[in-house]
Image (spheres, rainbow, N blue to C red):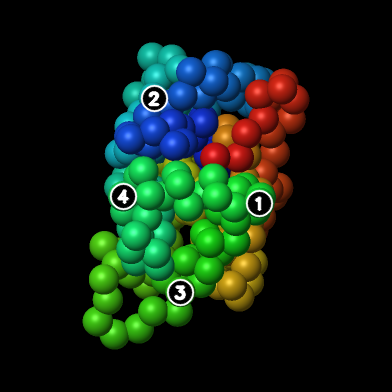
Amino acid sequence: MARLYLVRHSQASFGMENYDQLSTLGYKQSAFIPKHFETLPNQTIDAIYRGDMLRHQQTLEHSFTGKEATILPGLNEFNHENVLHVHRPEIADREKAMMLLMSQPNPKQFAENEFDIAMNKWMLEEGPTAYAETFKAFKERTVDALQQIIATSRKEKHKEVVAITSGGVISLLVAHILDLPQSKIGGLNTIIANTSVTSLLFNDSKITLGYFNNYSHLPKEMVTFF
């Protein structure tokens, strides 16, 4: 069996105008990712893949320093802002969004609930849509990226492969492999920690889950989920 390690990017810039870049803490988190792989035979990783988002690139540069990665856009996160804006068009205005959030008794719980509702609406959408990418299209290109990685790994006889990606991609692939209802994807997504590692085992005939959302390499005070 070979292993594919799905690494969630380090903390991005939540609440900032440009989310797609690492925060100051995110840069620090990245340095701890290699610690997770210290137990590999000869500490050897045969291949690295990443999405083409800036936070994926920056996570790679500050973890596996100097290593080259194959870029697969299929590993990119879905457009969470678009999914939220279709659900609540008024929050497209950042100032109004912050006012709405801070007016709630429990802003964190409110944000999580709204995201769950928006996700479910997106996953159930059929026919003409205002979404930048449908859930069906997101699933197809994400599963296709997984299949590309596995096919190349089998051809090149790679045993230890890393893919730096995002929480939505990881939660979808885990649900796909375990044949879970798509309604479970949102719940999985919210608990995937930044820099966490999810292991998939594969050979020519099957793919199985090795472990999910392991972030034991991170100091406790550095653990984040957004």
Q: Amino acid at mark 2?
A: Gln
Instruction: Tell me the residue that label 1 is attached to.
Output: 105
Q: Nearer the viewer, mark 1 or mark 2?
A: 1
Q: Amino acid at mark 4?
A: Asp
Q: Earlier in the sequence, mark 2 or mark 3?
A: 2
Please report the residue visible at 32 percent of the width from the left and 34 percent of the height from the top.
18
Q: Is residue 90 left or right of residue 130?
A: right
Report, in whole angstroms, how far the alpha carbon at label 1 lies from the one at label 3.
24 Å
Report, in whole angstroms, how far the alpha carbon at label 3 lies from the one at label 4.
21 Å
Q: Secondary structure at mark 1?
A: loop
Q: Residues within 10 Å of mark 2 (few under 14, many from 20)?
A: some
Q: Residues within 10 Å of mark 3 (few under 14, many from 20)?
A: some
Report, in whole angstroms, how far the alpha carbon at label 2 lies from the one at label 3.
32 Å
Instruction: Tell me the residue that label 4 is attached to.
Output: 93
Q: Earlier in the sequence, mark 1 or mark 4?
A: 4
Instruction: Tell me the residue that label 3 is attached to.
Output: 121
Please report the residue visible at 41 percent of the width from the left and 59 percent of the height from the top.
84
For the residues bearing labels 4 and 2, Cβ distance under 8 angstroms? no
Q: Is 47 located above or below residue 137 in the figure?
A: above
Q: Amino acid at mark 1?
A: Pro
Q: Could you say where residue 38 lies in the image, as x and y percent from the top left?
A: 67, 21
Number of dots carrying numbers = 4
Quadrant of the frame with the C terminus: top right
Instruction: Tell me the residue that label 2 is attached to.
Output: 58
Q: Nearer the viewer, mark 1 or mark 4?
A: 1
Q: Earlier in the sequence, mark 3 or mark 4?
A: 4
Q: Secondary structure at mark 3?
A: helix
Report, in whole angstroms, how far the alpha carbon at label 1 lies from the one at label 2.
35 Å
Q: Earlier in the sequence, mark 1 or mark 3?
A: 1
Frontmost residue, 162 versus 157: 162
For the residues bearing labels 3 and 4, Cβ distance under 8 angstroms? no
Q: Nearer the viewer, mark 1 or mark 3?
A: 1
